[in-house]
Image (cartoon, rainbow, N blue to C red):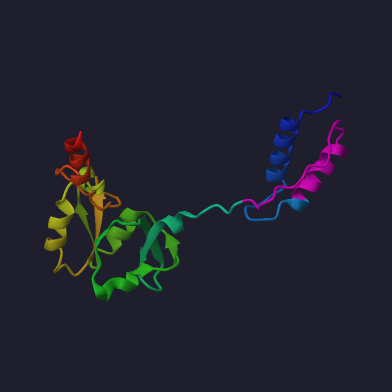
């Protein structure tokens, strides 16, 4: 049997670690040692003791951490929408934004269909979603009296709304103008 290269060995250790159920956030010291011993036992030549990584494997983030959870408190279903997609949230409905999932995760359309009395949508353009137009400012004024939670959608799908970028100043910088005049 040929000696195994370092890269190939590292790849083999990672594959075996994944098969063995190495979970994100676990300390890797014992896993690396066990995988190295397993490779030695299987007859790989040139296997040397690997140094464990200095840090633990980072934990994968959940899509719940990157989204807003909507549902009825104590209800049997919830759905997620992107952070920043809520255009209007009345005070009396703040409890519909859940801190953790409750009930079954359902498609956005299902929650909307079953919750028309407290949940609504407002179609916006992609330019407004990217913060390139002031359509949102006009909508905010129109939605002030709305009694439902209003979610920004584009083609019936919830979309986040970015803040409009500030337009660059059209006046030249006074310091730059002074430098030009001094030449």
x, y percent for residue 160: 30, 52
In the rendered image, which quarter is residue 92 located in? bottom left
Q: Pick whichever, 140 or 183, lies toward us.
A: 183
Q: Is residue 46 magenta?
A: yes
Q: Quadrant of the N terminus?
A: top right
Q: Quadrant of the C terminus?
A: top left
At 23% across and 43% down in the image, what residue appears?
126
Segment colored magenta? 31-57
The residue most toward the top is 2
In the rendered image, which quarter is residue 104 located in? bottom left
At 21% across and 47% down in the image, what residue appears?
128
At 39% across and 57% down in the image, what residue appears?
67
At 84% across and 38% down in the image, what residue appears?
48
Q: Is residue 120 left or right of residue 62?
A: left
Q: Pick whichever, 101 or 61, lies toward us.
A: 61
x, y percent for residue 176: 22, 41
Q: Is residue 85 left or right of residue 105?
A: left
Please say if 178 is above or below 139.
above
Q: Pick whichever, 180 or 147, lies toward us.
A: 180
x, y percent for residue 78: 39, 63
Q: Is residue 24 magenta?
A: no
Q: Pick whichever, 77 or 155, lies toward us.
A: 155
In the rendered image, which quarter is residue 106 located in? bottom left
x, y percent for residue 41: 88, 39
The residue most toward the front is 182
The residue most toward the bottom is 92
Q: Is residue 6 left or right of residue 129?
A: right
């Amino acid at each position: 049997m040929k000696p195994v290269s370092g890269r190939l060995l590292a790849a083999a250790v990672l594959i075996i670690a994944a098969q063995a159920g190495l979970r994100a956030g676990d300390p890797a010291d014992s896993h690396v040692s066990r995988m190295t011993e397993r490779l030695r036992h299987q007859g790989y030549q040139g296997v040397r003791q690997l140094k464990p990584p200095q840090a633990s494997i980072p934990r994968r983030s959940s899509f719940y951490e990157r989204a807003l959870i909507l549902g009825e408190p104590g209800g049997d279903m919830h759905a997620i929408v992107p952070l920043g997609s809520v255009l209007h949230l009345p005070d009396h409905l703040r409890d519909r934004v859940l801190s953790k999932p409750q009930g079954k995760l359902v498609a956005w359309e299902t929650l909307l269909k079953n919750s028309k009395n407290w949940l609504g949508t407002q179609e916006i353009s992609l330019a407004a979603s990217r913060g390139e137009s002031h359509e949102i400012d006009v909508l905010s004024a129109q939605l002030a009296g709305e009694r439902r939670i209003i979610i920004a959608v584009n083609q019936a799908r919830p979309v986040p709304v970015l803040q409009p970028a500030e337009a660059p100043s059209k006046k030249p910088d006074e310091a730059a103008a002074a430098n030009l005049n001094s030449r």
